[in-house]
Image: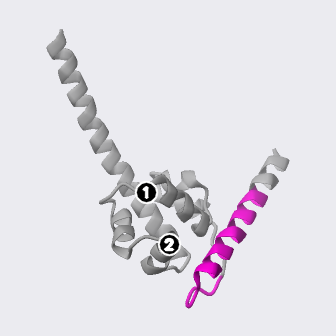
Amino acid sequence: MVVWILIANFATDKHYERKQGTMSNAIGRNLKVLREANDLTQEQMSNYLGIGRSAYANYEAGERETPLEVLERSASLLGCELELLFEPDVETVKDRMMVCAFRTDGLTQADMKEVARFKQVVLEYMKMQKMLEE
């Protein structure tokens, strides 16, 4: 009986690792799709997030697990709900993303914070509109 429990736990742990790797890949792919749709570079994203470009590149590649704080700040700048970063279907991501036209070259940290705030206001407005329609 004890041996069976150990084997079951081992199998569960391996399943979790495979699933986690897949989730990191989906998150990374979604970060990249949304970043490119917003015409931002990895350098701009990493500067906004206060991390190195190589760390951000690893998140996009699914090679490192992305911390929640990075996901929250990324979602804010990219103009999406946090849950969209976890979406396994890339077509759903493309359908649900919000892209605003902003000049992206020469953006300062302050500019990027304002863009993120603006997108958050728009997202909240869209949520309220949806609730009123229901």
- 106 left or right of 111? left
The mark found on residue 35 in the picture is: 2
Residue occupying the point 64% across, 70% down? 116
Q: Is residue 57 magenta?
A: no
Callout 1 amino acid: Ile
Figure quadrant of residue 10: top left
- 65 left or right of 99? left
First of labels 1, 2 by sequence position = 1
Image location of residue 72, percent across then percent down = 55, 57
Other residues around mark 1 within 10 Å, as few (<14) / some (14–19) / many (≥20)? many
Q: Residue furthest bottom?
A: 106
Figure quadrant of residue 67: bottom left
What colouring does the structure picture have?
one colour
Q: Secondary structure at mark 2?
A: helix
Q: Main secondary structure of the magenta part?
A: helix
Callout 2 amino acid: Arg
The mark found on residue 67 in the picture is: none
Residue occupying the point 50% across, 69% down? 49
Image location of residue 35, percent across then percent down = 50, 72
Image location of residue 75, percent across then percent down = 57, 62
Other residues around mark 2 within 10 Å, as few (<14) / some (14–19) / many (≥20)? many
Q: Which is nearer the eye, 110 or 82?
A: 110
Image location of residue 98, percent across then percent down = 64, 67
Can you identify the residue that label 1 sits on?
Answer: 27
Residue occupying the point 78% across, 60% down? 125
Which stretch appears magenta? 102-126
